[in-house]
Every structure is written in structure tokens, then in C-alpha cells.
Image: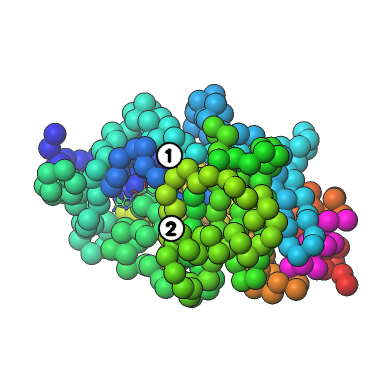
Amino acid sequence: MSLERDVDVIVAGSGPAGSAAAAALARAGASVLLVEASAHPRPKACAEYASPRIAEELERLGVAGAWRSRAVALRGMDLHVGAHVAPIRYADRSGPRPAWGLDRRTFDALLAEHAAESGAELREDTKVVELTGDGSRIDGAVLRDGRTGREGAVRAGWVIGADGARSTVARLLGVERPVRAPRRIGLVAHVAGPPGLVDHGEMHVGDGYYVGLAPTPGGELNVGMALPMRGRGSAADRFAAAIAGIPAVQRRLDGVERLAPIRGTSPIGHRVSEVAGRGWLLVGDAAGFVDPFTGEGIYRALRSARAAADAIHGGSEVADAYRAERRRAFAAKSALTWLIQGFLALPWALEHVVARLETRPAAALRLGSALGDLRPATDALSPRALAEVLAP
Ligand SMILES: Cc1cc2nc3c(=O)[nH]c(=O)nc-3n(C[C@H](O)[C@H](O)[C@H](O)COP(=O)(O)OP(=O)(O)OC[C@H]3O[C@@H](n4cnc5c(N)ncnc54)[C@H](O)[C@@H]3O)c2cc1C
């Protein structure tokens, strides 16, 4: 197949954001080339705990039944800080809603397959290595086939950068910015699921770091952690030391076998100065990612993909429409996420909040539902809601 031809849209990256954008655009009739640097199923360093609202996004895309058979429903996340445990649960008007434990290898492969079935052309082992354009507008990309080393230019009406937190597209556009704070490394591995931890996740905050435990399909458990950038020893040493440093995690994982290599990313996070311009849009992590503590990256990837597809499908003022929709969808939630990051930097304050949430289930449910995008984040940011969790 020739690499030189024209399409409506090139999507760089087939993680959740890229596959969702490609599927939505192809279903709307666009010719879409979905380019993936690796090949599915591919590993992804992720704690694999997904927000309840991924269900709606996946149903919109038409993947409803298939993904549920590869996910475990979880009633929420117990947040452990010091001696306190706050139950983070989710509900909308119709009642309680589950979060989801996923296996990213099979989940991402399923979404890429769905994009192809929806009409997008999926090219694996192929990277976007350059963007083309006349200086005023991006009009395509140069692709490199990883097997042959051949390069070729493809012209496109739009290039969507969905190539994750180390986005080549963002770098080539010159919109990537340094991550100043929080600066953490992420380590994850699957272990055999310990008995008693099958229907919920746990988040344990230690001294300057945190460890998440999330059941995944097949009876396994994802152990994910965010650690300070500076630290001694190999990833395996740091992984073991982080577990040993929080007695409740150590007890949970005592004698449990590790089933897969430790995967990492450093630093976690990505910043950009702009998410859209003439001929290009960034979606998912490529458009910016803060930290996995609030477990929403996969939902944001799917939600931003929908916003991008709708904006392109809408046809006029695409970049403005995309920015506006992102503001509607994410602005209040981002404020809540940054507030929580502030508390993570102040362990005594976080412990106080968790102690109050422990004895106030309605407040914990409000916060959980806002974090799960089931009610507006502004509900958790109102003066009354803040007073309830912050009062001495
Ligand atoms: C340690 C850690 C734990 C996390 N835990 C959670 C969690 O529990 N819950 C949650 O919701 N989120 C979590 N996240 C965030 C979540 O993983 C991301 O938000 C999500 O994967 C974003 O999806 P994406 O499609 O934007 O990017 P990705 O999933 O990263 O996909 C990007 C794709 O682009 C491909 N690519 C890269 N460069 C190129 C190129 N030049 N050309 C073509 N293809 C390219 C890559 O191979 C990859 O397949 C975590 C993140 C980290 C780092």
C-alpha cells in the first residue's frame, strides 16, 4: 500500500483517545487513517481504574456489549490516609454507578479494532514523524513504516494528535511545555489478586507518594504508584520499598505473586500551551495530563475524542468549537483535580479531609460523583460542600 495519498483525517495514536476519535469520524462518513506506532495488544503503564462515565462514551461509539465482558465492575475506591478511610462511591439520579477495572492491553486493542470496523484504516507499526503544511495551516503528516523504514507523506484536512503524554504531534507543533508540578514517576505491575479485594479499589497515601490497588479482569490486581522523581535503586527496588512503606498495602500484598514486568513512566504528566489550531487538534493525554490520582485519564481521552470528532464533523470554526467544548466538559473538573493535587502536597490537610469524609457518606458520595463526572464538579466546589469537608 502506498503511503502517499489523501484522507479527511489522520489520527496519530490508537490509545482510547485516537481510536474513539477515529471511530466517531469514520462512522460519520469521514475517511480516516489511524496510525499507531506500536501494534495491539500493546502494554500501557496505567492503574486501569476507569471512571463510571466511560460507559456512556463507549455506548455512543457502539462498543457497548464487547467492552463490558472485558471489564470488572467496582463499587468505588476506598481512600486510605493515616488511620482514616473514606469510601469514594458514585451515583447519578438513577442510583449507584460502578467504576471499572480494565486490562489496557485488551481494552485498547478492542477500541482500535472497533475503529477499524467502523471504517477507519488502522496502520500499526507506523509513526507520525513530521507534520506538513505551508506555515499557516497543517495539511498532513509524514509517516514512517516501522517494519520497512519507508517514509511517505499523507495529505489530510485534519491531523489529530492522540499520541499520548509524550506526544510527537504536540512537540512538532511547538506547543509542548515543561511539567513543573507535580513531578512524579509512575510504576505499575499486575499481581495475583489477593482474596478480599475483588469488588473495589484502594488508594493508599504514604509519605510523599501514593499506591493504588485496582482489581482487573481475570482475577488480577493492578498495583500502581506515583513516587517522587528523586529516589534510589531500580524500578523493582522502588516498587518494593513503596509497598513496604505503607503497612496496609504490605498486608494486602503479603505473599502475593507479581505476574508481569513493572512498567513505568517518568515524569507522569504532559502540558501544552494550545490544544487546537488550523488543521490540527490534540486529544487525550496529548492535550495535557496532570496525574492519575483521580483516575480520569481514560474518560477524558474518550470525552475529548468526542469533542474533536463533533467539532470536525460540524465543519466550521473547528478549533474554536473544540476549545469551547473542552471548556464546558473539563474546566470545573480540572479545578477540582488541581484542588485535590494541592491536598496531596499537604498530607496533614488531606488526612483531615479524609477523616471528615469518613464520617460523612453524603459528602463522600458528592465528591465521588463529581470525580466520576456524574454530577457537575461545581457541586463539590460550592462553599457549602467545601465547608463540609474542610471545617475544623
Ligand atoms: C502511572 C499511570 C497510571 C494511570 N492510571 C490511570 C487510571 O487508573 N485511570 C485512568 O483513567 N487513567 C489513568 N492514567 C492515565 C491514562 O493512562 C491516560 O490518560 C490514557 O491512556 C490516555 O489515552 P490516550 O489515548 O490519550 O493516550 P495513550 O493511551 O497513551 O495512547 C497513545 C498511543 O499513541 C501511540 N503513539 C505514540 N507516538 C506516536 C506517533 N508518533 N505516531 C503514532 N502513534 C503514536 C502510542 O503507541 C499509544 O498507543 C494513568 C497514567 C499513568 C502514567
- Residue 161's place in the image compared with 193, above or below, is below
**At label 1, which amino acid type do we have?**
Arg
Q: Are marks 1 and 2 in contact (CB under 8 Å)?
A: no
Segment colored magenta: 350-359
| Residue 262 located left or right of residue 86 | left
**Left/right of residue 370 with respect to residue 57 in the rendered view:** right
**Residue pointed to by mark 2:** 264
Secondary structure beneath dot 2 equals strand
**Mark closer to the observer (1, 2):** 2
Vertical comparison of 252 with 273: above or below: above
Q: Secondary structure at mark 1?
A: helix
Which corner quadrant holds the C terminus?
bottom right
Q: Residues within 10 Å of mark 2 (few under 14, many from 20)?
A: some
Residue 135 visible in image: yes
1 or 2: tag closer to the N-terminus:
1
Looking at the image, which residue is at 77% across and 50% down?
87
**In the image: residue 168, left or right of residue 380:** left
Q: Residue at x 37, y 67 (%)?
A: 175
Residue position marked by numbered label 1 in the rendering: 105
Which amino acid lies under the numbered mark 2 shown in the image of this protein? Gly
Question: Does the beta carbon at disc 2 come under 8 Å from ligand 1?
Answer: yes
Residue 353 lies in the magenta-colored region: yes
Q: Which residue is located at x 51 percent, y 68 percent?
A: 184
Identify the residue at image location x=87%, y=55%.
Answer: 360
Quadrant of the rendered structure where residue 71 is? top right
Question: Pointer 1: residues within 10 angstroms few (<14), some, or many (20+)?
Answer: some
